[in-house]
Structures are given as structure tokens and as C-alpha cells.
Amino acid sequence: MNIPVRTTSTTAILSLVFGIICWFALPFIGAIVAIICGHVARGEIRRAPPGTIEGDGMAMAGLILGYCHLALIAIVIMLIFGIFGGLAFFGHWHF
């Protein structure tokens, strides 16, 4: 009897770990690593024979955490430039 061996994708685990870490320790780098590892893991899982590699949920969670963190960083940067850019623009006007 040949029982198929099920393994969890290492890149899926890395994606989830860096997706969590990016919110606490490595803000930008962690998000990038989580996104790259998540895409690699999902491709690896899709190409493998069905049921042999697990971890699609972990890869997806890492992707979501990484993309949400990058979106938050982008919003904060836009707000900073908007506030300070607006102050610089209106600083030249005398009412």
C-alpha cells in the first residue's frame, strides 16, 4: 500500500511568518518577503500533484498581510506628503 506523503510548503510558512513579522519588526522588507514567498508557494502548490503539498491557506494569509501592510505604508506616505506639501504650498501665501 502506497500512502502519499503530504508536506507543508516551506515558502508558505515563510510567507505567513514574514507577513506577521512585518507588522512588528521589519515593516517594508518583511512585507516584500511575505508577498514574494506567498506567490512562490502558491505556484509550487498548484504545480505539485494534488494533495501532496499543503499550505495554500498560509501562503494566502501571508500575501494578504504583506499587501495590506504595503497599502498602509503607501497611505501613510501619501498623507505625510499631502500634509507637509500642503503646508509648504500655503506657507508662501499671506492672508
Image (cartoon, grey):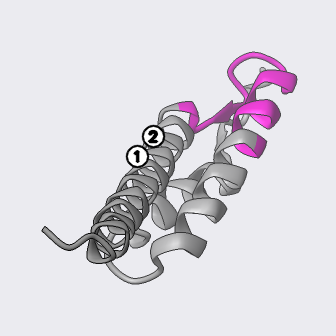
Image vertical order of residue 18 relative to residue 26, above or below: above
Quarter occupied by residue 51: top right
Q: Residue drawn at (49%, 55%), measured in percent from left and top?
A: 70
Q: Which quadrant of the rendered structure holds the N terminus?
A: top right
Q: Residue drawn at (53%, 71%), measured in percent from left and top?
A: 28
Q: Residue drawn at (34%, 61%), measured in percent from left and top?
A: 76
Q: Dot 2: within a 10 Å radius of its alpha carbon, few (fewer than 14), some, or many (20 or more) residues? A: some
The residue lying toward the viewer, choosing from 84 and 53, is 84
Quarter occupied by residue 85: bottom left
Q: Is residue 61 left or right of residue 42?
A: left
Per the model, the C-alpha gap separating discs 2 and 1 is: 6 Å
Image vertical order of residue 37 relative to residue 28, above or below: above
The residue lying toward the viewer, choosing from 74 and 28, is 74
- Asked whether the beta carbons under mark 2 and mark 1 sit within 8 Å of each other, the answer is yes
The amino acid at mark 2 is Ile
Q: Which quadrant of the rendered structure holds the C terminus?
A: bottom left
The amino acid at mark 1 is Cys
Q: Which residue is mark 1?
A: 68
Of discs 2 and 1, which sits in the foreground? Answer: 1
The residue lying toward the viewer, choosing from 18 and 95, is 95
Q: Which residue is mark 2?
A: 64
Q: Residue drawn at (36%, 75%), measured in percent from left and top?
A: 88
Pick out the residue farthest to the top: 50
Q: Does the magenta portion include 42?
A: yes
Pick out the residue farthest to the front: 95
Magenta-colored span: 40-56
Pick out the residue farthest to the left: 95
Pick out the residue farthest to the bottom: 25
Per the image, label 1 sits on a secondary structure element best described as helix
Per the image, label 2 sits on a secondary structure element best described as helix
